[in-house]
Amino acid sequence: MKFALTILSIFILNTFAEWLLPWWILGIVCAAVCYGAKLSGAKSFLSGFVGIALSWLAMILWKDIPNHHTLAQRLAEVFSLKGNYPLFIVLNVLLGSLLGGLSGLAGRLWRS
């Protein structure tokens, strides 16, 4: 239960924080939540990973679907993905979730 609550807390706090603050606020959010959650190292990493993955996926799709994936298609071409915009979205979510997972682990290790 504590694990699911940690994921939900990271998801909600990060989604609202990224409206007003830069993208790297995810590190502070994950570290702070995992610091207070008192989970194990693996669960802290997974909660940061999943919470940020859900947050970034929701934000990307919320902005990308109304404009018919125009920006994602153009950026996929810039990164030589040949118009494969779903792969571009997956790579963005994976990068953000790795940063979130490492930040969650850092918050756990900071506690000990």
Image (cartoon, grey):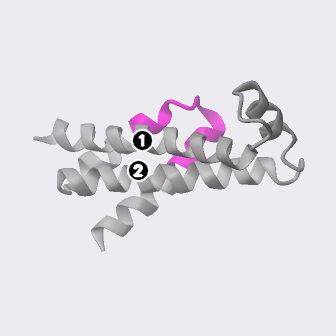
Give the residue displayed 32% in from the left and 44% down from the top: 104
What secondary structure predominates along the stretch shown in magenta? helix
Is residue 44 rendered to the left or right of residue 96?
left
Task: Say what secondary structure mark 1 lies in.
Answer: helix
Give the residue displayed 75% in from the left and 25% down from the top: 78
- Point out residue 67 in the picture as x, y percentages from the top left corner: 89, 47
- Point out residue 77 in the picture as x, y percentages from the top left corner: 78, 30
- Point out residue 79 in the picture as x, y percentages from the top left corner: 69, 27
**Do tag 1 and tag 2 residues touch (Cβ < 8 Å)?**
yes
Q: Mark 2, residues whose alpha carbon is within 10 Å: few (<14), some, or many (≥20)?
A: many
Name which residue type carries label 1: Leu
Which residues are the magenta region?
Answer: 13-28
Query: Is 38 above or below relative to 107?
Result: below
Label 1 sits on residue: 98
Q: Which quadrant would the N terminus be assigned to in this image? A: bottom left
Q: Which quadrant would the C terminus be assigned to in this image? A: top left
- Which quadrant of the structure image shows residue 88? top right
Report how far apart the C-alphas of labels 1 and 2 lie in the structure: 6 Å
Residue nearest the observer in this picture, 88 or 30? 88
Label 2 sits on residue: 49
Q: Which mark is residue 71?
A: none
Is residue 110 magenta-colored?
A: no
